[in-house]
Every structure is written in structure tokens, then in C-alpha cells.
Image (cartoon, rainbow, N blue to C red):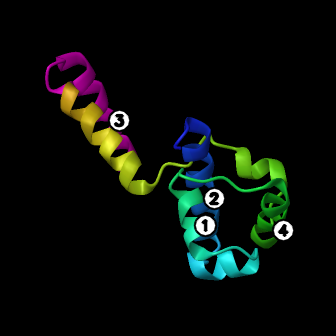
Amino acid sequence: MKTEINKKLGKRIQYLRQQRGLSQEKLAESIDIATTSLSYVETGRGFMTLATLEKLARVLKVELYEIFRFNSVETNEEMFDYILKKVDLLKYDDEKLERMYNLVKVLL
């Protein structure tokens, strides 16, 4: 069952794995689980035991608590989609549109 914590944990594990350039197959092998099990975890449909989470932390070279740091696990695509949705709303607000225009000019 997909719970909010499972989804967040899965995204975080996927993010950390990708940051280290590991495939699902390589990471699953390193922590002694099936690739399908890792896939279930990364998609929020499964969960790992504490022992497996400890192995995962060692392989990813992070402290165990860092696996549960959910504050920024959005992918670039997710962040871009979010920004586009918000920017689309600006066309109805002249003041905010001008402020965003000036901000973009400064940033880019």
C-alpha cells in the first residue's frame, strides 16, 4: 500500500541512488535484495527492514537519518512542472507578473 511516508522514502532513495550513479540492479545487489523489491520501495509500494536500511546507508555512504530527509527530493522535471503551473497563474496578476519578469531578468 502506498502511504505518504513510503512515497517520500522511495523518492529519497531513488534520488540518493541516482546521485551516486548507481543503477537499481547494482544497488539492489549491493544490499542483497531483489531489483523488483528496490523498485517497489522507490515507487512507494514497498518498505525496507531496518537491517536493509542500514545496509543501504552504508552503500550510499550516508548516515541513516539522511535517508529520511525529505525536504528536497523533487526531480528537475517535477520542479520545472511546478514552476510552469505557478507561472501560468501570473498572466492574470499584472503586479506579480512584473515582479517575476524582473526576477527572471536578474537570475538569467
Q: Which residue is mark 2?
A: 13
Q: Are marks 1 and 3 in contact (CB under 8 Å)?
A: no
Find numbered disc 1 in the image and state the secondary structure of the residue it sits on: helix
Task: Report if the CB atoms under discs 1 and 2 are less than 8 Å apart.
Answer: yes
Q: For the residues marked 1 and 2, what is the alpha-carbon distance in whole angstroms? A: 9 Å
Give 105 or 90, whichever is nearer the viewer: 90
Q: For this view, does 84 lie left or right of residue 73?
A: left
Vertical side of 20 occupied by 26: above or below: below
Which labelled disc corresponds to residue 103? 3
1 or 3: tag closer to the N-terminus: 1
Quadrant housing residue 96: top left
Q: What's the residue at 42%, 55% (across, down)? A: 76
Q: Is residue 105 visible?
A: no
Tell me which amino acid carries mark 4: Arg
Q: Nearer the viewer, residue 60 or 53?
A: 53
Q: Are marks 1 and 4 in contact (CB under 8 Å)?
A: no
Vertical relation: 68 (above or below) 77? above
Residue position marked by numbered label 4 in the rendering: 58
